[in-house]
Image: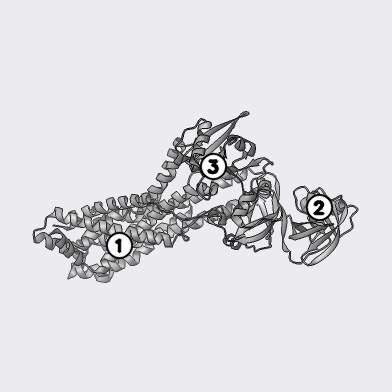
């Protein structure tokens, strides 16, 4: 009996072109969510394409280790005093001299040469101090004053002084990692894309919630279209419970089908837009990808429709038979 | 007579129904307005980065953004030689990766830096950040922060000398001396990203433009972009009235595309309005048919429904604009460290009002045909 009721409602709704009304309420949230998801994916793909072309290695100082080639270091401010002149500069503190030497590709102990530890290796002579290296400098690390041997070293990618053989208080610790540029580029891309996808999901959520009242009005309209059939079925002795189930499942199913249709329609529109854009401008965008998560939206809309259809039917049933 | 009928019609349904319709329209207007507002704010971003105080003739090379532009100081000074009462601000902008996010370092020169911060920066590696950005980067005053240059792929340790209250777009950037920014950007001694030429006397800018063989109105000059393009050993000069268009154009996108997209989203967001218009007439079906029975014509009734729809639209737009102002931060788009909140102008609100009125009226027509006998 339930199947018969369901079939009657489907045929009746199909004849009265109810799908068009449902389309008006389902198409906007589907299309907007699809466009936003597709643009986030497009940015992701574009960025990945750019990152793929990055080559070579890079040194990266971060709070968390990046990859395997990392050495734990401390970094903080150091004030170097020579005679009456002084300069304050950020400096690196080697916690494990040997490990750090491997990461930066410079043998720090060898570079320190004649300087005994503790020593400060300067990337270039600090012009403000007018030093004749090697020499002894007074280094202020927080409240501690030390007399340290200073020597110029070829530190390649490191352009701050490296202090070996001494640990300072008030420093921060992190990891100096040798990483390939592509994996670093991926980190940058991820940070940019995560901001964009956050807004996209926030906006999609707003659109879907804004469309709940519209979906309710649409369900009212659908009920109006099939009220005669409901009256006929009720008069033939179909119970109210069965009719409610039939109407609710019919509405849910209709929303699911129409939103799936909207999703694919939106996809075709996006593909068309891409072709038009490729012809009218020099920009090239990657083809939008429909992930399985896109199917969540039709399912969510269909589930949302079920309670709305139930409420509409309960309110409308009374009027049909009064 | 008509106003009495309208009054009767309006009073015939509960206030809650009126409120429901207005709330629905307001929500849809809010979605559309925020889409348009975000697009126009995004478009304005380059204006704000290049000239945060909103004035001046920006000099840039032909590049995809102010961050990737390179100009030579000697050339810009050569352009304004023999012109008095002119002030040039040279700026170096460098995108860096710091604290897990991409931030822009703005390098400014002596006097301009002092004027912005109210104090002098000490030390070559000294930087200043706003309270908001310091919170996001997880640094405080006196901290040392690693800045990784995206363009040169080298890192530098910088010292956060101060956490300050910075105005407008500066609050989203790391402020430094020009040398540090130049090192991060990988520029030589005489080079900068962009320059902003300002003058109290508007005649000076038009004189400058005419000397370069360019003719533009004074009002346009104060917000224009002077693009320098190296052609062999020659530097060609080109004036553009729309600053962001030059940069966005280099990405292969025309300004209109951005707006077409925004208007499409805004229209799509309101596609269900015909259903709402039809539902509106349906809500008034009983009293409307009574009025018909009393001799009110269908045309007159339709007019009344259109008036109701327009009043609803106006109220909904006011509510949506207020909601947009209140929820600015929630809807803000993050581009690099810049927070782009939707900004609304009269043009955006008027366009949404027009689209909404047309869609709703079409629904009203549909409703009158179906429900009024």
Q: Secondary structure at mark 3?
A: strand
Are discs 3 and 1 both within one chain? yes
Quarter of the image where the N terminus of chain A is located: bottom left
C-alpha distance separating marks 2 and 3: 39 Å
Crowding near pointer 2: few (<14 within 10 Å), some, many (20+)? some
In this rendering, does residue B254 appear at all? no
Tell me, for residue B22, which label it has, or none: 1
Q: Tag 2's secondary structure?
A: helix
- Rendered position, A310 above or below B110: below
Q: Is residue A187 left or right of residue A30?
A: right
The quadrant holding residue A149 is bottom right
Find disc 3 in the rendering and name its residue: B58
Q: Residue at x 14, y 62 (%)?
A: B4
Which of A173 and A295 lies nearest the eye of the viewer?
A173
The kind of secondary structure element at disc 1 is helix
A106 vs A145: above or below = above
Based on the displayed image, in which of its 4 quarters is residue A317 positioned? bottom left
Q: Position of residue A197 (x, y in %)?
A: 50, 55
The reply to the same-chain question for discs 2 and 3 is: no
| Residue A249: image location, x then y, percent | 32, 63
Residue A188 visible in the snapshot: yes
The one of A55 and A315 positioned closer to us in this rendering: A55
Residue wearing tag 2:
A129
């Amino acid at each position: 009996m339930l199947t018969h009721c369901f079939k009657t409602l489907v045929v009746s709704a199909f004849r009265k072109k109810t799908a068009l009304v449902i389309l008006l309420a389902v198409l906007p949230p589907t299309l907007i969510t699809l466009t936003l998801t597709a643009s986030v994916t497009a940015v992701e793909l574009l960025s990945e394409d750019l990152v793929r072309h990055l080559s070579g290695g890079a040194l990266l100082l971060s709070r968390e280790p990046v990859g395997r080639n990392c050495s734990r270091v401390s970094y903080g401010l150091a004030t170097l005093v020579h005679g009456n002149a002084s300069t304050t500069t950020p400096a690196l503190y080697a916690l494990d001299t040997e490990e750090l030497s491997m990461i930066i590709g410079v043998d720090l102990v060898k570079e320190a040469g004649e300087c005994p530890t503790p020593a400060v290796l300067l990337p270039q002579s600090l012009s403000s101090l007018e030093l004749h290296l090697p020499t002894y400098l007074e280094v202020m690390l927080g409240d501690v004053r030390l007399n340290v041997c200073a020597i110029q070293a070829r530190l390649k990618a490191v352009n701050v002084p490296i202090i070996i053989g001494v640990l300072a208080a008030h420093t921060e610790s992190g990891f100096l990692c040798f990483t390939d540029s592509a994996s670093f580029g991926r980190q940058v891309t991820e940070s940019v894309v995560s901001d964009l996808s956050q807004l996209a999901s926030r906006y999609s959520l707003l659109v879907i919630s804004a469309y709940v009242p519209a979906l309710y009005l649409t369900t009212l309209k659908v009920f109006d279209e099939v009220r005669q059939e409901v009256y006929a079925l009720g008069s033939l002795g179909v119970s109210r419970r069965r009719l409610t189930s039939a109407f609710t499942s019919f509405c849910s199913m209709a929303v699911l089908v129409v939103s799936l249709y909207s999703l694919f329609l939106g996809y075709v529109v996006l593909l068309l837009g891409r072709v038009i854009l490729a012809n009218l401008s020099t920009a090239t965008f990657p083809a939008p990808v429909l992930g399985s998560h896109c199917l969540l939206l039709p399912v969510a809309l269909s589930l949302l429709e079920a309670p709305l259809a139930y409420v509409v039917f309960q309110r409308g049933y009374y009027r049909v038979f009064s | 007579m008509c106003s009495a009928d309208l009054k009767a019609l309006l009073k015939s349904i509960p206030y809650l129904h009126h409120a429901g319709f207005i709330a629905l329209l307001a929500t849809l207007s809010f979605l559309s307005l925020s889409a348009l507002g975000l697009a126009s704010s995004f478009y304005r971003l380059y204006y704000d980065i290049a000239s945060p105080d909103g004035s001046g003739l920006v000099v840039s090379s032909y590049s995809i953004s102010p961050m990737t532009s390179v100009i030579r100081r000697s050339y810009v000074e050569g352009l304004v030689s023999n012109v008095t009462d002119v002030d040039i601000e040279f700026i170096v902008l460098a995108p860096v990766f710091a604290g897990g996010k991409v931030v822009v370092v703005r390098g400014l020169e002596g006097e301009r830096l002092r004027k912005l911060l109210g104090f002098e920066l000490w030390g070559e590696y000294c930087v200043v950040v706003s309270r908001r950005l310091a919170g996001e980067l997880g640094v405080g005053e006196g901290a040392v922060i690693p800045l990784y240059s995206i363009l040169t792929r080298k890192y530098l340790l910088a010292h956060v000398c101060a956490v300050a209250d910075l105005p407008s777009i500066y609050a989203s950037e790391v402020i430094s001396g020009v040398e540090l920014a130049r090192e991060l950007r990988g520029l030589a001694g005489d080079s900068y990203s962009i320059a902003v030429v300002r003058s109290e006397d508007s005649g000076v800018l038009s004189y400058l433009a005419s000397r370069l063989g360019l003719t533009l109105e004074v009002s346009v000059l104060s917000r224009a972009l002077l693009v320098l393009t190296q052609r062999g050993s020659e530097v060609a000069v080109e004036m553009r009235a729309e600053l962001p268009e030059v940069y966005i154009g280099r990405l292969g996108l025309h300004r209109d595309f951005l707006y077409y997209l925004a208007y499409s989203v805004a229209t799509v967001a309101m596609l269900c309005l015909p259903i709402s218009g039809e539902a509106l007439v349906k809500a008034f079906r009983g009293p409307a048919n009574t009025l018909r029975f009393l001799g009110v014509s269908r045309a007159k009734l339709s007019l009344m429904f259109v008036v109701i729809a327009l009043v609803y639209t106006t109220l909904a737009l006011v509510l949506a604009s207020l909601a947009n102002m209140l929820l600015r931060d929630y809807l803000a788009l993050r581009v690099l460290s810049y927070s782009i909140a939707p900004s609304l102008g009269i043009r955006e609100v008027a366009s949404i009002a027009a689209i909404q009125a047309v869609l709703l009226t079409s629904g009203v027509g549909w409703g009158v045909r179906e429900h009024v006998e």
